[in-house]
Structure formats: C-alpha cells, structure tokens
Image (cartoon, helix red, strand yellow):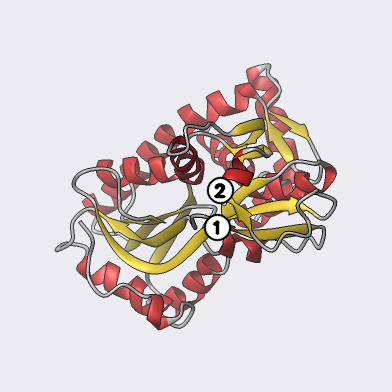
Amino acid sequence: MDFRQLRYFVAVYEEGHVGRAAERLSLSQPALSQQIRQLEHSLDVSLFERGNKRLLPTLAAHTLYNHALPLLDGMQRARDALRNFRGQALRTLAIGVLQTVRPSLVPQLLDRVRKAQPHLVVQIYELSGLEIERRLLNGSLDIGISYLPPRQPGLHGLLLYEDELQVVIPKTHPLREFKKVSLKQAAELPMILLGEEFQVRQIWQGQLANLGRRPQVQAEMNNMGGILDSLPQTSLATVLPGRAQEASEDQELLWKPLSEPRVPLKVGLVFRDAQRQQASVELLRTLLEEEIDPRQMGLSPLG
C-alpha cells in the first residue's frame, strides 16, 4: 500500500463510482480498477461491493477511509512546506463542500475560478459538515460550503442561499398525490437516510425530537447519489434539501415540500480567520453571484 493507492481509494470511496473517480483522477477506468484490486490484495480485505449503479463501501473501507484522510492531508502539507522552503510554493485554495448543496455550484465555481485566477490551484473535497468544520479548525481547509450557522466556536459564516428540506419518494409511494407532507406525516415514514455524521440527518433528527419522535430508519447510506438511485426500487422515503433535486435525473422520484412547519436551511461560506481570508471569501462570493439569485446572497458575516 502506498500514498498513490490511498489517493485512488479515497476518490472511489467519495465518488461511489469508478468512472467518476477515474475522471477526477485523470486515469482510465481499467487502470483505476486494477489499482483498487491490488490495494485489496495487499490488505487482504474487500473494500467495495457493487450495488445498483454504484460501489458500496464495506466496513473495512469505512475504516481505511477514516485513516487515509489524515495521512493524505499530512503528505500534502509536507509537500507544500517543501515547496515553500524551495521558494516554489503554488497558490492553493482548499474548499470543502457538502454533497447535499446545489450540484451546479462546484463545476460553476471551478470554471469561474480558473478564468478569474488562472494560476490558483483549487482543491475541492466532498465532506460531511462535521468534517468540513474539523478541517477548517486544523488548517487543512481554507473555506467550506456548508450549512449555517457553524457549530464550532471560532468559525464564521457568510450566507450564499436558502433552501429547505423536502421529502423524496418513489412515484409508487402512497403519498404520491400529496402536494405537501406535514412533519408529523413524514415522522411516520420508513426511510433510507444519510448517516448520522451528515448535517442533514442531524437537522432532521432535531426536528423530530421537537415532536418527541425518532426517525424511522430502515437503511443508511453515506452517499446522496446512492440514496437517490435506490429509492425507486423501494417503498421508502428520504429527506434532502430541495435544491439537491438538480442532482437527480430520475423521473421515478417525487419531491414533496415539508410543511407544518417548513424546515429552512441556510447554505454559505464557512471560514476560520475572517481577516486573513477576506480576499478568498470575497472572491468565491463574487464568482458565485451569477449562479445564485442575488436576493439570496448574504450581506454580512454570521459568527
């Protein structure tokens, strides 16, 4: 096992799909698959099981992923330090992004940063909200795109747009004719949900706790795409931000607004040092204004 294989493994784990991981790494799919097989052979464990259009990580994969991230982060910091020592530092901007934010944000952001700052190297990581905040605090991320307000002391937020939780069901679901689903109705639904480390899950659990209820969890997945792929084959429901509908082209899914009450979400830039990072925050905010309705943009930082 070497750092290259760990980097390949992390890409497959986070993408849940060899094709997308290969594209992200600029590798061919056969070459990437071979590297993952070699890694499994060297560790003598199975890391992935093939599901419906996706690769499902095993328990061994979850364990390896949690150990691989700090190793890769440490290696990158060591490389950056050596570049600085040689006077050859690259200007980098490391951004952590929730997988449940607007899917169009990342590609639009990459394209606009490239045009505005062609010498800036952008590193984007798809992470849970908890992991984004952890990495901001330890310095391995510069900025996050996450839910506001930040939960950790010492972090600041700047609103980008507002969203709200919706119930997602297959077209065959008993609630298919409902225009809206009340919170009490949704509390009764058997669901497939993101894991408890994800902020959407925590927000949902908090809403149900106000009713003295707990989620009716039938299955958990750590990837929003996997949930959306699985729902049409089940009679289950899930809850996701409404704007995540952009990520789903499946015509077999119905997105129902929650009511009584609505569950609003605020999505924004999260950062640690407001003064030092002012230029980077303003750059991202400016570049995203064309993608997001200006009426939804934040005007002042949130502590």
Residue at image position (35%, 79%) is 286
Left or right: where 37 falls relative to 286:
right
Left or right: where 30 falls relative to 200:
right
Residue at image position (64%, 42%) is 12
Q: Earlier in the sequence, mark 2 or mark 1?
A: 2
Circle 1 is placed at which residue position?
259
Q: Which mark is residue 183?
A: 2
- Tell me the quarter of the image containing the C terminus: bottom left
Query: Few, some or many C-alpha atoms within 10 Å of disc 2 (few <14, some 14-19, many ≥20)?
Result: many
Q: Nearer the viewer, residue 284 or 6?
A: 284
Q: Nearer the viewer, residue 274 or 267?
A: 267
- From this view, report whether residue 279 is shown above or below residue 253: below
Q: Are marks 2 and 1 in contact (CB under 8 Å)?
A: yes
Where's residue 64, x and y in %? 54, 26
Where's residue 285, x and y in %? 34, 73
Left or right: where 276 falls relative to 1:
left
**Residue projecting furthest to the top:** 44
Where's residue 125, x and y in %? 47, 51
Q: Quadrant of residue 93?
A: bottom left
- From this view, report whether residue 178 is shown above or below residue 12: below
Could you give the CA–CA distance between mark 2 and mark 1, rounded to whole angstroms? 6 Å
- Tell me the quarter of the image containing the N terminus: top right
Q: Nearer the viewer, residue 100 or 170?
A: 170
- From this view, report whether residue 92 is shown above or below residue 291: above
Where's residue 174, x and y in %? 80, 48
Please state which amino acid type lies under the numbered disc 2.
Leu
Please state which amino acid type lies under the numbered disc 1.
Ser
